[in-house]
Amino acid sequence: AIMYHVISFISVRSMVLETERLVESRRLLEAHARIMELERWQDEVLLQLQGARGSSGTGLTSEDEELVRNYFSGVGSLVDALAKELWAVVGSGLSLACQNPTLFVSAVRIVEREEALDQIFLEERRSTSGHNTPLPPGRPRCWREHFFK
């Protein structure tokens, strides 16, 4: 398990660059899958740090959290870039639906996935009676609400 995390941690920078190219070429579903994987890695690191600190009674320090956020800082930029492309696709929905419906359907599917993830994270937070469980960075995204604006 530790080797998986080490390899994943080393791969973050190259995966961010690769995902940027996917977003730029509007391969949105692939880009979204990569972003979700990067976010999962980030969440796992934060949870492991929180667990390690929690067992000693100190909790996750702001320095630890800041270190992880800085290392994964490219992920937030990717989310912003993906959102920008999604809203461009949605904004030209009627013409795109006629010319390239696949791209529009991809955008809708990503918004649906993000909304489901938001609900899962919020429900998990509600189910932990202490409400001390932090939401992952950038959550909730509320992309469904933005979609209908």
Image (tube, rainbow, N blue to C red):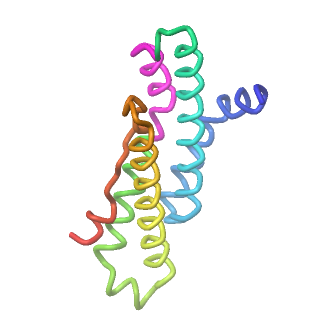
For the C terminus, the quadrant is bottom left
Figure check: 45 above or below 110: above
Farthest residue, direction bottom: 98
The answer to whether residue 16 shows anywhere in this view is no
Q: Viewed as shown, does residue 143 lie left or right of 47?
A: left
> What predominant SS class does the magenta segment belong to?
helix
Query: Is there any visible trace of residue 122 in the rendered image?
Result: yes
Q: Is residue 119 left or right of residue 26?
A: left
In this rendering, is residue 29 above or below 119?
Answer: below
Taking the spot 76% from the left edge, 33% from the top edge, the residue there is 4
Q: Quadrant of residue 10?
A: top right
Magenta part of the protein: which range?
A: 60-75
Where's residue 112, x and y in %?
A: 44, 67
Q: Height in image: 132 above or below 107? A: above
Q: Quadrant location of the N terminus?
A: top right
Residue 107 is situated, as x and y percent measured from the top left of the image, at: 44, 70
Residue at image point 72% right, 26% down: 6
| Magenta segment includes 36 | no
